[in-house]
Structure formats: structure tokens, C-alpha cells
Amino acid sequence: MPTRDHLFAAIRDRFAGGQGFALATINLDHIVKMRRSGDFLDAYCRQDMVVADGNPIVWLSRLAGDPVDLIPGSELVVPLCELARDCGVSVALVGSTQDALERAGRALGEQVPGVDIVLRHAPSGVFDPGGSEAGAILAELNASGAGLCFLALGAPKQEAFAARGRRDAPTVGFASIGAGLDFLAGRQVRAPRWVRAIAMEWLWRTVQSPARMLPRYAACFAVLPGQVFAALRKRVG
């Protein structure tokens, strides 16, 4: 979706029609994963809406002559809950840990008075989006009446689960938001606003967790030249 307004208008229409959707938030790490996994690429192709979760995606879109807004998944949770409340749609939280979901649910109740959270489910440590546990969660979602489900399962599990959910829970809107619920629960801390404003959140995260983030960002930087070339080719073409 090119802009935040386009995204929320599309979701509002889905809510009004009782239609589900799958929303993914793309960044360079996801591009790396898609290059390595045909299954992940297929799951992305089955998303109804994709927004830019990182500044490099926004810069590449401008370079390609097709600009999009920066819409981080972690910043969608509260606004989407407000939209769901206003549309009379109930909410489910899936992912992370049960304690984090309880804390995130309380935070959402304080920040979005009137939001109706009908399900909180933390999958097992061996969760497989194609397995029986995932099928049971989808059945639970259908029974709960939730119209919006936040997925905090990490990529590629959350996108694969959302793609399956479009078939098995067609009235549920799935929003893959990564660490968004952990931020609300206080289990992870986002970079200060000024760090985000100068597009240095990646450096903040690297300092916080170098062993995990250094290999990830090295892979992201490795694919960047090819993405720049592809964006320029699209602009010229």
C-alpha cells in the first residue's frame, strides 16, 4: 500500500464487509529471506497488503519512482486497534509468550479504551505454521469471532501463518507485526524517537544485540546494491 491513508481505508472496507486480509510489513531482512526461501516468497505473494517497514524500502521506492510511506509494523498495533474498536471488530493476539500477551493486552486496554480483545494465544516453541498446532489456533480464531489478529511470530512464520489463515479463517484480518506486542509489553525497548528520526534504529538494535543483528544487517547490506540496480531499472523502464 503506497500510503498510510490508503492502508487504513482498505482495512476499514474489509472490516465493513466482514472480509479478512493478510498484511505484511516488508524490510530488507525479508528480502534476504525471500531470496533464500521459495516458500517465504510464496507466502509474501499471498499477502493482500504490504507496507514498508524500513527506511531502505522507502528510499528504494523513491528511487524507482513509485514512492511509499514508512509504516513500521510496531507502530500499527495501537492505530489498528482504534480502527477495530470504531468498526466494532474484536481483536486477537497470537505469538510471543503468554505473559507478554497479557501485558500487551493490558497496555492496549489502557491506550485504546473499549478495544475488545477476545483471544491471547502464545504458540509452543516448536510452532509450525503448516502444522496441526497452527490449525488448532485458526479454529480457535474462527470460534472467537475475532476480526483482527496481530501476529508476533517473527518472519517467516507469521507471514506463512497469515497466508494459511486467508484460506482457513477467511473473515479474520491478519497483521504481521513482529516485535510489536513485545514493545507494548515492555519486553523489548524501541530506539528513542530521535534515533528513528535520523534512520539509525538499525544501529541502535545492533548495539543492543550484536550477535543476533550483525549477521542480519550484513546480509541486508549485501543485497542492497542489487535492489538499487533493480529500482533504477524500474524507473528507467
Image: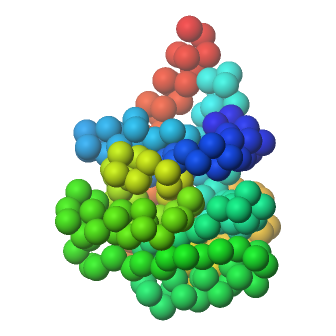
Q: Residue at x 20, y 62 (%)?
A: 131
Quick one: quadrant of the N terminus?
top right
Image side of residue 87 versus residue 170, left or right = right
Quadrant of the rendered structure where residue 124 is? bottom left
Q: Is residue 125 above or below residue 43?
A: below
Q: Residue at x 53, y 65 (%)?
A: 146
In the foreground, 201 or 189: 189
Q: Residue at x 55, y 17 (%)?
A: 234
Scheme of colours in the image: rainbow
In the foreground, 31 or 226: 31
Q: Is residue 3 above or below residue 72?
A: above
Q: Residue at x 49, y 51 (%)?
A: 171
The image shows residue 70 at horizontal and vertical percentages of 69, 47
Quadrant of the rendered structure where residue 90 is? bottom right
Do we see residue 69 in this rendering? no
Quick one: quadrant of the C terminus?
top right
